[in-house]
Amino acid sequence: MDDVVAAASAALGMALSEPAKLGGSDRSAVLRCRRPDGGAVMVKSYPRTVLGAESFTAEAAGLAFTAESGIGPRLLAASPQARLVVMSDLGSGPSLADVLLTGPADAAASALLSWARACGDLAVASAGRQDELARLTAAHRIAPTAGSRDHWLQHRLGEIPALLAGLKIPAPPGLGVDLAEVASILRPGQYEVFSPGDICPDNNLLTAGGIRFIDYESAEFHSGFLEAGYLSMPFSTCW
């Protein structure tokens, strides 16, 4: 933790202190740190793996890309050497997951619709800006593209035959063709929209200004049909 705080301080140009762990995963770790003026910032660091490099690149580019929209934290600093970003602190408000799990039902329904509307508003606000995100991604890239993993959807699709075999369910005729057709939406096309990438119900905060997305590790432009499907049947791949 000391090394992360020191690297974040160097990137931000001010001494940070009082780091508090806010969780994370095997893909990243999140700290809240105090600035000298008493305010707080968020520090997110990534492991020295191919996935860690890709996550840093996507997060830094995604945060920079959405800086003017107010839809998420502001990128304050990024250190490719330390594989970390420093972001503005949006506070400790509840997430959509909190409201869905605790209710009441009318508040949960309202929050879910606000979340879906925020996804749509972000897609509209970022329409046609693929080249801008591509430039930001290139500027923050710290690993060669040749070492990249498959897209998460491609990876999931590739697991289906083995899952069926493990369950002793015969694969239906033409399954490979069907899966290839689903995977085809990953090709760049004219109906692309921007997404933070992982919009599970806990990767946001409910603030006075509306929904704010807080995870950009998989930020990308992808098919609008993928986004529409997810908004129609949300969280089917989340915990």
Image (tube, helix red, strand yellow):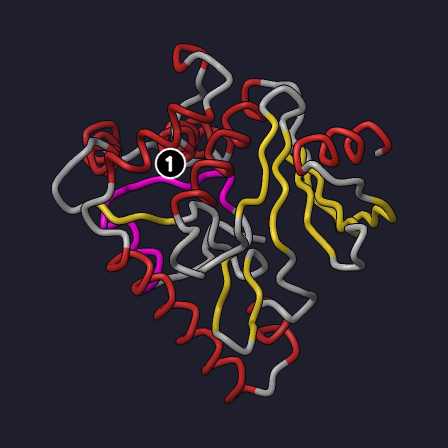
Q: Residue at x 53, y 85 (%)?
A: 107
Range shown magenta:
216-232
Apparent side of residue 41 relative to residue 112 in the rendered image (left or right): right
Q: Is residue 226 magenta?
A: yes
User: Where residue 57 sits in the image (x, y, percent)?
Assistant: 49, 29
**Residue placed under numbered mark 1 in the picture:** 153
Q: Residue furthest left?
A: 190
Q: Residue at x 77, y 31 (%)?
A: 4
Snapshot quadrant of residue 92: bottom right
- Crowd class of label 1 (few under 14; some 14 to 19; many from 20; radius 10 Å): some
Residue 192's place in the image compared with 154, above or below, is below
Residue 102's place in the image compared with 190, above or below, is below
Residue 231's place in the image compared with 51, above or below, is below
Q: Residue at x 31, y 65 (%)?
A: 121
Going by the numbered disc 1, the residue's amino acid type is: Leu
Q: Residue at x 69, y 36 (%)?
A: 13
User: Where residue 49 sits in the image (x, y, percent)?
Assistant: 61, 18
Snapshot quadrant of residue 125: bottom left
Pick the front one: 124 or 226: 124
**Which type of secondary structure does the marked residue at label 1 adopt?**
helix
Apparent side of residue 8 relative to residue 127 in the rendered image (left or right): right
User: Where residue 221 sits in the image (x, y, percent)?
Assistant: 30, 41
Apparent side of residue 16 relative to residue 50 in the rendered image (left or right): right
Which of the image's four quarters has the N terminus? top right
Residue 147's place in the image compared with 103, above or below, is above
Q: Is residue 134 magenta?
A: no
User: Where residue 235 sits in the image (x, y, percent)?
Assistant: 47, 58
Pick the front one: 94 or 80: 80
Q: How many marks?
A: 1
